[in-house]
Amino acid sequence: MTDKTYNLLPSFSLIMAMLLWASSFVALKIAFQGFHPMQVMFGRMLIASLCFVVFIPSFRKISWRRQDIKYLLIMVICEPCLYFTFEAKALELTSASQAGMITAMMPLLVAILAWSWLKEKISQQTLAGFCLAIGGACWLSLASEASTNAPNPLLGNFFEFMAMVCAAAYTVSLKRLSSNYPPLFITALQAFVGTLFFFPFLLLPEVSWTIHWDLAPALAVLYLGTMITFGAYGCFNYGVSRISASRAAGYVNLIPVFGVILGMIILGDQLNPSQWLACGLVFCGVWLSSRSGRTAATQPLKSKAS
């Protein structure tokens, strides 16, 4: 493998992760047509865990560091536990296209958390971009109209924003851990913890087991467990282990593009003219903040102390 190919692998892995993540919004909407959201979350985690069973013997060689325990806990609590809980609620209430647009704010949230947790510098331009993107997201939500695909878009978009807060915390924690733990192990840990976390939700009274096993929702759950939880997270964790968290988070800007396109093609989602202007405002905010963060993004995140 040449040095040029090796250097391109992180970028290719991150692009693939973003394409797969964008498709997950569509897959979730399809899966929810046949299953309760908590059944979908547990199913995808269980399927992903089964994919990792074969790697368990190699994980025994990994040496745990006591100082990393808190970061591991923050990582798995934020994602998959809280992230998937918020996203499940979001996709019940808003469209796949709108949820995909909210993800554009994740790079800004990563910059904010890197500033507050890891004492990285953050410019006024980044803060201005963050405020602009937040305004665009609020506009997108307020301009939404209830539909079959989005019965309560305002609340759904708020839940998706909370999911992005969790994703940002996950990304910063992941960068802290990636130098000591292989991406495959981190991805497997997320799957195993996620399976345990979502299992009790299956016992809730509102989770009905009188399910019609339609083919499309069942295949969507299988897709989520293999291609998303196993594949996308594996690609993303590998990419973050090779470049800075800020640069890696910048690739999230591809999700809204992929998400809107896939939502329109597969689910028939539509955005009104006011929402398209709101999308533009979100992208302007992200662009404004990314211009000021290019130099810093080339440097890996560092904490004050190990």
Image (cartoon, rainbow, N blue to C red):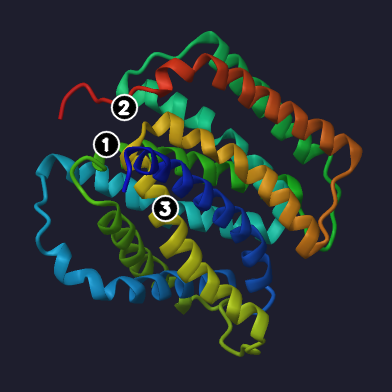
The residue depicted at 49 percent of the width and 62 percent of the height is 228
On residue 24, the disc is none
Amino acid of disc 2: Leu
Q: Give me the C-alpha separation between circle 3 and circle 2.
A: 19 Å
Q: Is residue 95 visible?
A: no
Q: Position of residue 297 (x, y in %)?
A: 42, 23
Q: Between 119 and 48, which is closer to the camera in this rendering? A: 48
On residue 176, the disc is 1
Residue tagged 2? 301
Residue tagged 3? 235
User: Is there CB contact under 8 Å for labels 3 and 2?
Assistant: no
Q: Is residue 93 visible?
A: yes
Amino acid of disc 3: Cys
Q: Position of residue 102 (x, y in %)?
A: 64, 41
Dot 3: what SS? helix
| Left or right of residue 67: residue 204 | right
Which of labels 1 and 3 is toward the front? 3
User: Is there CB contact under 8 Å for labels 1 and 3?
Assistant: no
User: Is there CB contact under 8 Å for labels 1 and 2?
Assistant: yes
